[in-house]
Image (tube, rainbow, N blue to C red):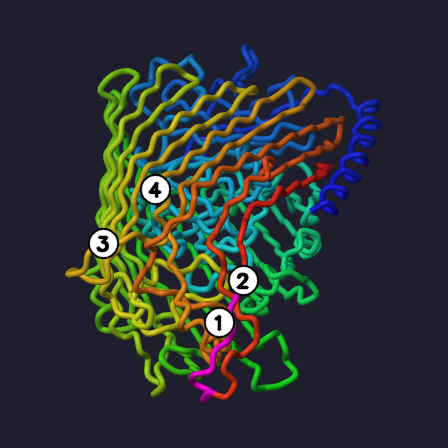
Amino acid sequence: MKYILHTFQRIAFILICILQITAMHAESEKFTVRGRIVDRLSREPVIGASVSVQGLQGVGAATDTTGVFVISGVNPGICRLYVTCIGYKSVLSAEYFVSAKMPTIEIELDEDSKHLNEVTVSVPVIRRVKPSPVSMQIIGLGEIEKSPGGNRDISRIVRSVPGVSFSPIGYRNDLIVRGGSPSENRFFMDGIEIPNINHFATQGASGGPVSILNADLIREVQFYTGAFPADRGGALSSVMDISLLDGNTDENSFKATLGASEVSLSGMGHFGNNTTYLFSVRQSYLQLLFKMIGLPFLPNYIDGQFKIKTKLGKKDEITFLGLTGIDNMKLNTDQEGEDAEYMLSYLPRITQQTFTLGASYKHYAGKNVTTVSLGYNYLGNQNLKYRNNDDSAPENLTLDLSSREQKLSLRAENRTYNDRWTWREGVEAWYAFYNDHTYQRVYHNESSISQYSTDISFAGWAAYGSARYTSEDGRLTANMGLRLDGCSYSDLTARFWEHISPTVSLSYKFLPSWAVNIGAGMYHQLPPYTALGYKDENGQLANKSLEYMRVKNAALGVEWTPGKQITVSLEGFYKHYTDIPLSVADNIPLSCKGNDYGVVGNELLVSSAKGRAYGLEATMRWQIPGKLVSMASFTLFKSQYKNNSDAGYINSAWDNRFIANVSATYELPRNWSIGAKLSAIGGSPYTPYDVDKSSLVEAWDAQGRPYYDYSKFNTERLDAFAQLDIRVDKNYYFKGWMLGFYLDIQNITKSVLSQPDVLMSTGVIENPDAPAAEQRYKMKYISQDSGTLLPSIGITVRF
């Protein structure tokens, strides 16, 4: 730890010197914002639209005969634009970064007959029009860029959203939403599904130490914790819908970043007049940071992204997307100490490859917009483990897993825009491949070896439709949707009529500053491929009886808007799970696993478990354009499950009881900003160890870690934990480029979470003369405390 702080001090001193030298040459610059306003459906330019910069009085322009606007004298930084025009709905845009290399903006307007003779002059501060009126948050560029403790990692940034838990144990990005499992979330990027968004993801779940996505390419994120859209299937807890930027139609620009754990280069530009591009490449040196901290595992990764968008004509466009992550986690066997000894005893060597490719064609035809998209996902996962990390003898091998998941999907969709109604209907077809070669030492009542190879493929299909209605006075908004899912894995999963997912949500403004929001739905998710492809000792697929997992979800809330800058909301939710896979060996639901490295689901399962989660969320947002972005949220909830209909409910692995977050970022003069976030979470349930089983030599050697006493599952609870993160940014703007510095410190108070002592083998056999099945190790306990001050310094250059 002292070495980290000394290194941090040296880096900070160098940065201060750079800041002083740079400040002498920096100029106070203002920039020009250019853009084009078009009719969403006809793609024709909107003439005479008024465009203003949010928070800047009198700074704006009107569009010319080609729909183009030019606004001069805009301060650098992050801003929104407000667009009004007679005959169109007013729009508060997404956030944009104003600098010398700012790309041309294109904003779409929807016709509205009630605004034929008037426009709204008052500029709103917070976006009121959202795709869903309930259980949905929009995360903009400002929060992504400067979220304290987030380090521009989207998986960490969404932890400020109500209902989202965080894990103070370890360095992981597990997304735990409203008491649900990390495996219950779905991710989409410009409409293309991404199987996971983290490096070193837990196969069959999600999570990992760092996100694959580079925040440089993200425009905004729509995050649903309920009332999921009908076109976003397969989610039980959340949907993360990520929108990427478009390329620069005027010039090529680049951004280089040197951070504490990675170096990256991103860029945007154009090929000719009709094609734009985005790209990003990153190389990690996270293994150096982890080695400095003294962790026994050393992850390293490379990732890349691209987006190419071509306008084939005024009413046709095609987009190509790509995402890749290549991961390699080695073990730091030189690390000493009891903590390292324990982690090295069970952590495998992990290599992983993730690829996503997608193409989307969009056609505008009057009031209809048709989209056809094709996506391909690939996940390769290899885990290798030797007892005592000694690969000199073949008999030391305890785990050798190599698996691949692939999915090819095709979707066709049509949207119809009418005056008060928006209709959407679509169909999906997909084909999945899964193969797995596993050798694993296991211990239940005796030592044995689980060895199998599986190679399966099956097809899936879905159909969906939805409608959105807005009343003429704008006080009532309603969404309705219906989805059907099925696949050919088994006779049970093929019954699409049993997998109907209806959803409805509405918002009614019963007073000028008060609204009530209601949502309800039922959603389905296919069990992970690791479970579907698991084979028994006879080489037969063992989990053919698994059903689609199901959750019924309801939410009711009120929203109060006392002024343009503040929004306060209170929302209650209830989730009821059925047909959840239950581990036959451990007698706990599969959904209570998945917050550690490795694989989840490759075991015998039955669809008998049930669960529930319910709670209350309170949220307040306060924004002053160009000055302050703040949010406070508090969630009080319970998460429980039972093995079958006759059993009683007990606490799930995600039952933290409460989550609290208070965050704020304030813009200071001379392009400085400072932010802080205070997070607190209730203690997680935990299960005591089975000391008798863990001490058996054959049992310990099989997995290198203690076994839990599942008859006492989650009967104990950890203490609550709180953490304070801060972030400081400073940007210098020049005529043709920008230089930025940031300091992000997680857990600045060095808060420590005390965990139960870990049971550990000493390697000494107490009864060497006993039969092999009865021999026991002499055991010891190791104290476990989590919580490290983690500073991160970064330099960014836009040019």
Q: Residues within 10 Å of mark 2 (few under 14, many from 20)?
A: many
Q: Quote the CA–CA distance across marks 2 and 4.
A: 34 Å
Tell whether position 136 is magenta: no
Q: Looking at the image, is mark 4 or mark 1 earlier in the sequence?
A: 1
The vertical placement of 629 against 382, above or below, is above
**Residue 516 horizontal/vertical position (percent):** 24, 27
Callout 3 crowding tier (Cα within 10 Å): few <14, some 14–19, many ≥20: some
Q: In the image shown, does 140 or 254 lie closer to the viewer?
A: 140
Q: Would you say residue 483 is visible in this rendering?
A: no
Numbered disc in front, either 2 or 4: 4
Residue type marked 3: Tyr
Q: Residues within 10 Å of mark 1 (few under 14, many from 20)?
A: many
Residue type at the position of mark 1 = Arg
Q: Which residue is mark 3?
A: 649
Determine contact: label 1, label 3, CB under 8 Å.
no
Seen at 57% across and 14% down, the residue is 59
N-terminal-most mark, 1 or 3: 1
Q: Which residue is mark 4?
A: 657
Label 2, label 3: how far apart the Cα atoms are = 37 Å
Is disc 3 placed on a helix, strand or loop? loop
The mark closer to the camera, 4 or 1, is 4
Whole-number angstrom distance, CA of label 1 to CA of label 3: 36 Å
* Residue 371 at x, y percent in the picture: 39, 49
Residue drawn at x 19%, y 56% is 648
Q: Nearer the N terminus, badge 3 or badge 4?
A: 3
- Distance between the Cα atoms at labels 4 and 1? 37 Å
Residue 354 badge: 2
Magenta segment range? 770-781
Report the residue marked by disc 1.
404
